[in-house]
Image: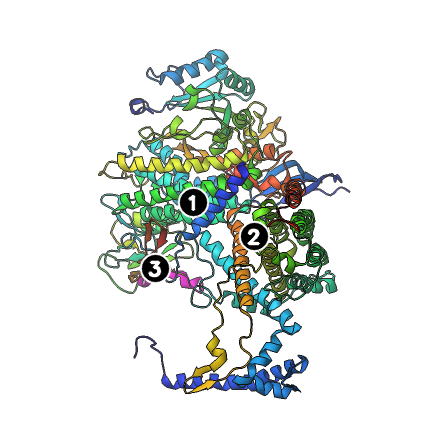
Amino acid sequence: MSVIAPKFRLGYFLKSLTDNIFWIIILLTLVGIPAIQIVLFYVDLPVLDGVLLTPFLAFTMLFHPELAVPLVKSLLYTDFFRIAAFPGFGFAALLAAGTIFIERKLLAKLQLRVGPFYCGKVEGILQLMGDGLKLISKEIIIPAKADKPIFWAAPILFVATAAAFVSLIPVAPGWVVADIDVGLLAVFAIIGFFPIITILSAWSANSKFPFIGGIRALHQMVSFEIPLILSLLGVVILTGTLNLSEIVESQTHYWFIAFLPIGAIVFFISMLAELERIPFDLPEAESEIVAGWLTEFSGMMYGLVQLGSYLKLYAFAALFVVLFLGGWQGPMVWPPFPEEIITEGIEAGPITIQVPGLPVTTQEMLNGTMWFTLKTIAVIFFILIPRGVFPRIRIDMLLSIGWNKLIALAFVNIFIALGLLYAGVLGPGGIL
Amino acid sequence: MTTQLPPGIQLEKVDERIMTLNVGPQHPGSGHMRLIIRVDGDRIVSCDPDPGYVHRGEEKMAEYRNYITNIPHLERPVIHDSCNILYPYCLGVEELLGLQVPERAKYVRVIASELNRFTYTLYWLAIYGIFLGHSTMFMWPAGDREFAIDLLEKLTGARVTHAYFVPGGVRNDLPANFEDVCLRQVNYLEKRLKTYGDIFYDNPILISRTEKTGVLSRQDAIRLGTTGTVLRASGVDYDLRVKEPYDVYDELDVHTNVLKNGDSYDRSKTPWLDMLESCNIIRQALEKMPKSGSVRVKLKPNPKGGNDEVYKRVESGRGALGAYIVSRSKPEPYRVKLSVGSFRNLICMPHLLKGEKLGNMPAVYWSLNYWPVEADR
Amino acid sequence: MGTATGIIRALNSGIKHIAVKRFTLRYPEQKLKFVGDGYQFDPTSGVGIAGYKGRHMLFHDHCTGCQLCSIACEGVAEAIAMVKVPETWKQNKKSIMPQIDYGKCVFCGLCVDACPFYALYMTNDYELSSFSKEALIYTPSQLQVKPQVNQDVDIIIDDRGATHG
Amino acid sequence: MSDSENSEQEIQAQPVEEKQPDLPKFEKDQSDKITTKFGSKTEIAFVKPNRIKINVKKEDILDVATFIRDELNYDHAESVTGVDFPADKEIEVVYHLGSYTDPQLDKQVLSLATRATREDDPNPGKDSTRLPSLRDIFYSVEFHERECFEMLGVFFDGHPDNRRLLLPEDWADLPPLRKDFAIKGR
């Protein structure tokens, strides 16, 4: 009997192999292909060399290597893709999921313990999948006298506002879901929604602990929105526009953090408060009010709120990067697309495939996305560290920091920005 | 027809401004006891501690057991400081029965009780950290406690309930190469303890949460008869290991750490400084320990104490822990009274919490080095 | 500027500790090594021999059925009952031996101290969980079996931190 | 604690008048100060190295206690212990007093003992087992006296709130630390 797998039987192995192949085929044909067909019906297909594509023609072209690229390229630039996948929800959810896992492992390592370990055989990789499935399978309990419609709506609203916030962030040059001229004002408007939704869910749960948690969350978020907004005025004064993409473009040679460090610090602290991170996590203070306004959520509702809060975390980190660390600006390190692939095509063994329409995306876009992601991950790292290093702040200290210390610093920052502007160093006529 | 209330329960006059809060036994912010706190807005108006949820009648049961079978029983009030709570009982019984404890046993006792000071104080510090919401300050002490527990497990055979001290010495001698393992782990533990400074004691957010809260002045500390780290945090230089050295503490030089302003910050710092001091004591004891000699005096099968009483005191993790034993020449002690540090510090709670903010309640409550199970006995 | 330097020092200490080794003992895979193979007591010198106080071990060839262990346990946990044993030993006329109920036992080892005939010792085995309270009662024949335990992990301390290896 | 004194000092079986010649000197003159001040009211139970026990009747314990606190500057009480003596129908309450401020008294513990009459069917609080409370002299005894009240049924006059401390509110049985309250199964 072999040592490696004592209970190995060849027959069983072959049976499981054929089983898997059978199931893959079934799923692909009965579910996969129809799904792609439906998507193709809704997506407005491009006009390729004179003829408007029908979904069936598009479908065949998808699986034909030489004809697929132009179709994929056209799909890339549709709005649906932007919202669902790249700069929008998909990219953010991926980063948010990564943050959840990294936070648990990082906090564990900082506390000299192991963190999720057994899920997924190697260092707990599948822990996130495990949590997700668990939350989906758990029963959603609605408190008896809860206000049912609002209680149901609260988590969905929470994720929706977080996604709306994510959609305003420019990830790469030209790659932003909603490139509106008053981008920064829209961000403040959406940030304004969060306290309302917290109070809605806390109030509708109709039980003591969530109510106290909700009130504390309201106090904290409202009192920290003011320094949050004031600290960004410095940036707006220097760039002169509210459009986030233009703000990023104006930071090609320098980053605003170099000139407005106080603004960056005030923004970072009030961001921690908005996200209810550890020094300011009074709304769900375990040792005083069980789990704050999250107490009554169970099952997928809790899952949605968690996803929403980590989306919010990604969005705030991304906002910090866009405003102070120069978004996608960074030295060109991405290798240019090799020319010979476009001219002679790819030699795959005996045959060479001619692929018209490459490269799918430009080199600046890839370089910009890389820099943006690196900076966001760095900022997220600095948002996660305080959780392992600081205790919780008391409610009255929280409010005193919010109201007088941070607002005062924000004003100082505005004066610095004005000084820079009138000294002609930065801004429209500036020398830099 | 006024209903006859069961004894001890009175009706409460409802005053619309004052709200009564039960920081009850199940509350995440209090141990196994209830604090009946009357709050006016955010200010605590009065606090009436109601211990007794884990009262097991230790002293009554001690009267039915002879001197040896009392050992695993009398360590129950605070099992993770079991050597220190058995120490005064053993010293008292030794004086009653006139036993001469061998020199090596005294040194082994000092090492075991100092190691136990680690396990208790680190456990207390971990809970103090989580009360303030500092999760790392829960994980680090809880992890570093494993060094002391590992040593005690090698020495006594049990992680927590050691039952290691016996009238007449200790139950067994040191295992094989215990000295250098102990030295190595105590040195590493000391290095670990030093890292607490940056992340906990010099942490500005923690300082702002605990400084000037629950200030116990020097006179009040003496007048209220507090003991141990609570007393030393208020500026009274009183450590039984120095003032009334028992066993071999007079041959070891013990330095007592005294801090002056008596607020919860100082009360959270003195145990930490004591632990750093314990490292030195263990090192000295390991050097000065006689290398050979028995560690226990053989007892007669059913020893009977004379018609006498004795009061012995020891510096435990929570302060002076006294054992008052009255014996009437019977194998069982006639009366055993454990005067424990937590019960003596309990009086501070109503005194300190009056006028305090509700947010400070966990910081002040747990800084009194109060172990509910021990206070209830 | 106490707060700013304090915050920076705390952050710096936190980040530095990310490099320190993880200390958790991964229990089912790693089991902590103990000294010797269990707590023993030498009645002549009246002093015990250091060892882990785990499950008891009964030597049927030494046990004389003198009940001293169950009398010792009366004051503590009443966990030891004397039970008829099928075998007949010359030194154990009544052929009764201790049966230990681990639902009550507190592992204090006073029974080992009380046994004058080198019959009752303790071993390193602490995994005694069972599905029913009755299964916790170990008969003398069960106590006779020496448990084989693979506990081979110890605390390793090096410059990059301590871990269980 | 010097061993020489310990070895030849033997326990005084009954409080005999003439003192042993070689009692520890410092504790000797401590107890003499009390006996000279109060004469027959106080009676020295024993004098051991670092430990003195004074028996006082319950009428004049208050002024003995104030004297001990003010003149001998014992400034706090460590614990209050009730011991039940059904044989001579009395409950003895022992106050262990210590001192933080006076360096000489660091090692000393002075036990101040009084006796209260013991009734067979106790009705805590309303029967004759009463003792004046020392709460106003030594503040720290407040909770100790409450525990002594509920465990032995000794009512302390003048105690601010003589409520039950550790036992459950509806405990209607005998005070548990009395000898006639037997544990079931023993």
**Viewer-side residue, C49 vs D44:** C49
Q: Residue at x 29, y 44 (%)?
A: B172
Viewer-proximal residue among A292 and B369: A292
Mark 2: give few (<14), some (14-19) or many (20+) Cα within 10 Å: some
Find the distance from the CA under tag 1 to the CA under tag 2: 59 Å
Q: Are marks 3 and 1 on the same chain?
A: no
Q: Up-down: is A172 above or below A282?
A: below
Front residue (pair D132, A69): A69
Q: Is residue A175 magenta?
A: no
The amino acid on which the numbered mark 1 sits, given as a three-letter code, is: His
Q: Position of residue B208 (x, y in %)?
A: 57, 38
| Residue A254 - label | 2
Q: Secondary structure at mark 1?
A: helix
User: Is residue A141 toward the left or the right of residue D77 in the image?
Assistant: right
Instruction: Please say if D57 is above or below C52.
Output: above
Q: Which segment did they paint magenta?
A: C129-142
Disc 3 residue type (three-letter):
Val
The image shows residue D74, relative to residue B293, as above or below, that is above
Marks 3 and 2 close (CB-CB < 8 Å): no
